[in-house]
Image (spheres, rainbow, N blue to C red):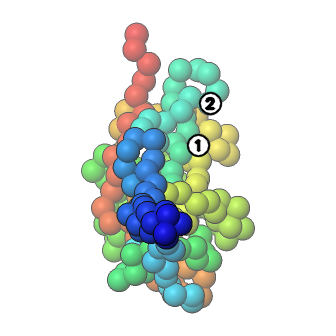
């Protein structure tokens, strides 16, 4: 009889016992991550987004900013995830207000950079948003000078996918400051 009562107590205790797991801050553990949305293979991009460093870097130590780090993302709307595509990236800077439009870009940029398909493949990276391309736009490329005649420029960008003549334009322009040192 005593064994039956002891067994009953153990069973009742085990039934009432509940195991919980908490983290060091007292909250429940995070849900295991799942795969985010993807863009179907073979999709051609129809949108581009860019981010860039807060300010251009001075890579040669003369106190004049000369290099802008740009991260570019390609999208195929309506798919929400960026993806990699074969093609070339183009960047140009203009005096503020003189860049023209995507349909009729100005002909006289202050500087222009073209990254061919091989350079684009080498620039592939992955950011928190997803697949991206990271470029360094240096005013010093090809013997250029970092002594711009202006402090602010308009940055224009587009992507030319391989196999089509349609350019994928960055919507609008992005203003970038290349400030001169304080005297």
Q: Identify the disc placed on residue 138.
A: 1
Question: In which quarter of the view is residue 67 placed?
Answer: top right
Residue beneath the point at 38% across and 36% down: 177
* Outermost residue to the front: 1
Between residues 85 and 143, which one lies in front from this camera angle? Answer: 85
Is the C-beta separation of discs 1 and 2 under 8 Å? Answer: yes
Residue 39 rendering spot, x and y as whole percentages: 49, 82
Residue 101 rendering spot, x and y as whole percentages: 31, 66
24 lies left or right of 153: right
Tell me if I can see residue 91 in this picture.
no
Residue 5 rendering spot, x and y as whole percentages: 45, 66
Specify the quadrant that holds the C terminus: top left
68 lies left or right of 155: right
User: Circle 2: is it few (<14), some (14-19), or many (20+) Cα within 10 Å?
Assistant: few
Q: CA distance from mark 1 to mark 2?
A: 9 Å
Across the whole image, how many numbered discs are drawn on residues? 2
The residue that disc 2 covers is: 59
Identify the element where label 1 is drawn: strand
171 lies left or right of 6: left
User: Circle 1: is it few (<14), some (14-19), or many (20+) Cα within 10 Å?
Assistant: many
Between residues 40 and 102, which one lies in front from this camera angle? Answer: 40
């Amino acid at each position: 009889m005593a064994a039956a009562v002891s067994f009953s107590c153990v069973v009742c205790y085990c039934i009432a016992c509940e195991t919980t797991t908490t983290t060091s801050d007292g909250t429940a553990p995070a849900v295991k991550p799942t795969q985010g949305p993807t863009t179907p293979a073979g999709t051609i991009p129809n949108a581009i987004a860019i981010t860039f460093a807060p300010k251009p870097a001075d890579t040669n130590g003369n106190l004049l900013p000369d290099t802008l780090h740009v991260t570019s993302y390609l999208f195929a709307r309506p798919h929400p995830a960026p993806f990699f595509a074969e093609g070339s990236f183009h960047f140009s800077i203009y005096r503020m207000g003189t860049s023209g439009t995507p349909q009729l870009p100005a002909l006289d940029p202050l500087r222009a950079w073209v990254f061919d398909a091989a350079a684009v493949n080498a620039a592939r990276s992955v950011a928190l948003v997803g697949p991206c391309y990271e470029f360094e736009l240096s005013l010093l490329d090809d013997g250029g000078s970092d002594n711009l005649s202006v402090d602010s420029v308009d940055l224009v960008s587009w992507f030319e996918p391989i196999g089509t003549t349609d350019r994928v334009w960055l919507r609008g322009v992005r203003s970038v400051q290349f400030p001169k040192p304080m005297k």
